[in-house]
Structure formats: structure tokens, C-alpha cells
Image (cartoon, grey):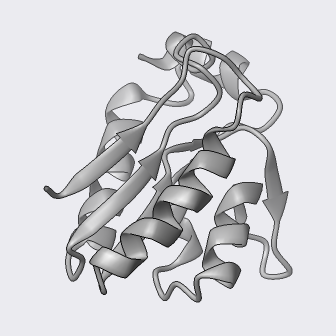
Amino acid sequence: MQGLFIASTGQHIGKTTACLGLFSGLHKLFSRLGYMKTIGQQHITTKQGTQLDKDVLVFKKHFVLTDSLKSMSPIVIPAGFTRDFLDQKIHIDDLRKKLISSFKTIQKNKQLVLVEGTGHCGVDSIIH
């Protein structure tokens, strides 16, 4: 198994909490475990100016993960993203490449990558 994707049918129902528990348990089985959140809606900006999903920082710090924050949180949806996408300033192929590249980067030396989806299946449907 290369990756385990966690999705839901609703927002705010415990995906991140479930992923924290799963990661903790899986870490006992796999010594080389990775994590990423595909699309970050609730994001923060680091002191270095990197925008990332707020949950990624929790995983990075708590589990002392060595992967880059950019790989762990490849796509962030800030205010205005939907308008830019509709105006074709953002292209789906670029997003897809970024997502796949980030997964492959994290996966490179891992036995398993836990991948947390965003919100629910309708949240990012405009960009599919």
C-alpha cells in the first residue's frame, strides 16, 4: 500500500482527529510514515511567507515529520481562488501536477502516506 486517503461526506466531522489517531496507530506499524493534506481551505502563513493548511503544522510538529510544509500542503485555497480559477488564472493541470509531485516527494522514502482530504466532496468540486 502506498497511500491511504481519508475523505468524508461532511465538514467538521472529525477527519483531522481521525487522521491524528490513525497516524499515531500506523506509526507503530510503519517506521517511515508520511502525511499530507491535499487541499487546504483553512490556512495559515508561516514567518517565511509559506501558506499552508493549519492541520499540516499540527502533524509536522507533533510527529516531528521531516517533509517540507509545501509538499505536505500542496494546494491552498485562499480568498479569491475560485474567481481566479473561473477566470482561468489557475489551471487544473497545474494543480494536478503539483498534487502528484508533492505526493511522490513525500512517498519517496515512506512505507505509507496518510492523505487527508479537505472538507467534504463538494467543497473543492469546482476545480475537478
Residue at horizontal 79 percent and vertical 27 percent from the top = 80
Picture mark count = 0
Q: Is residue 125 above or below residue 49?
A: above
Taking the image as drawn, is residue 120 in sight? yes
Q: Is residue 24 above or below residue 98?
A: below
Taking the image as drawn, is residue 53 in sight? no
Task: Examine the image and state in which quarter residue 9 appears.
Answer: top right
Horizontal arrangement in the rendering, residue 3 relative to residue 65 (left or right)? left
Residue 13 in the image: x percent, y percent?
72, 28
Q: Is residue 128 above or below residue 24?
A: above
Residue at horizontal 68 percent and vertical 50 percent from the top = 17
**Quadrant of the rendering where the N terminus is positioned:** bottom left
Task: Examine the image and state in which quarter residue 83 appears.
Answer: top right
Residue furthest toward the left? 1
Residue nearer the viewer, 75 or 55: 55
**Quadrant of the rendering where the C terminus is positioned:** top left
Residue nearer the viewer, 42 or 21: 21
Residue 74 in the image: x percent, y percent?
50, 55
Task: Examine the image and state in which quarter residue 26 appears.
Answer: bottom left
Q: Is residue 41 above or below residue 83?
A: below
Residue at horizontal 72 percent and vertical 37 percent from the top = 41
Residue 123 in the image: x percent, y percent?
63, 17
